[in-house]
Image: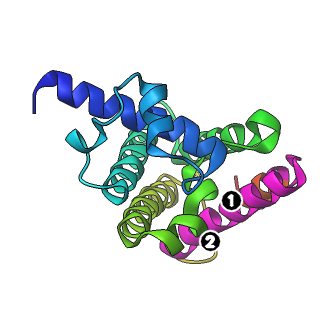
Amino acid sequence: MSVTKVETRQSLLEAARRIVAAKGYAAVGINEVLAAAGVPKGSFYHYFASKDAFGEAMMKSYFDDYLATMDGILADKGKSSAEHLMTYWQRFYDTQAADDCQGGCLVVKLGAEVSDLSEVMRAATKAGTAAIVDRLEQMITDGITDGSVSVGESPRMTAEALYDLWLGASMMAKIHRSAHHLDRAMTVTRQVLHT
């Protein structure tokens, strides 16, 4: 692919993420994404084989960015593992509390929807969320090692339970348009990690 084609493809993915985060996947048409990215109608299939392939690429792009943010948090050697974890959860909180608790997490927005619509998007979401939990598990393990965290369950079980807690709290925050559930998730997270 030429640089121009790669840049145009990325522009389409970024435009789609913004629109889909607001409207959902099924409600967004290809022409709307093309218009938002400033790409001529009819050229979509020069970049993606199908809408399904496009959705899969959008989710993978989202997770690539998300995981890079997590890796940036982990790279800060001046903080303890507990501080890494709480920095992550605070960013999660801030993202989900934004825009009257409508958030920007595509997992919260699309998880149930794409699991029913597209097997490739479900698989991409499953792989992405597993990678998030892997990093949380590593942060918890590191926290146990450096003494800044203690947990009652295994690091893996704790990472999975906390991520599930935050996804549920984010959904409830959207429903109630209130950060109350996110506040509770933060309190429970601190209790579970003993921070």
Mark 1 surroundings: few (<14), some (14-19) or many (≥20) residues within 10 A: many
Position of 84 with respect to 90 (left or right) is left
Identify residue for label 1.
166
Disc 1, SS:
helix
Q: Position of residue 82 (x, y in %)?
A: 58, 48
Q: Quadrant of residue 160?
A: bottom right
Compared with 23, 150 (above or below) is: below
Position of 99 with respect to 46 (left or right) is right
Q: Position of residue 146 (x, y in %)?
A: 48, 52
Q: Amino acid at mark 2?
A: Ala
Instruction: Name the mark nearer the viewer: 2 or 1.
Output: 1
Which residue is outermost to the front? 42
For residue 53, the mark is none
Q: Position of residue 179 (x, y in %)?
A: 85, 46
Q: Label 2 vs label 1: CA separation?
A: 9 Å
Boundaries of the magenta span? 156-183
Front residue of 49 and 143: 49
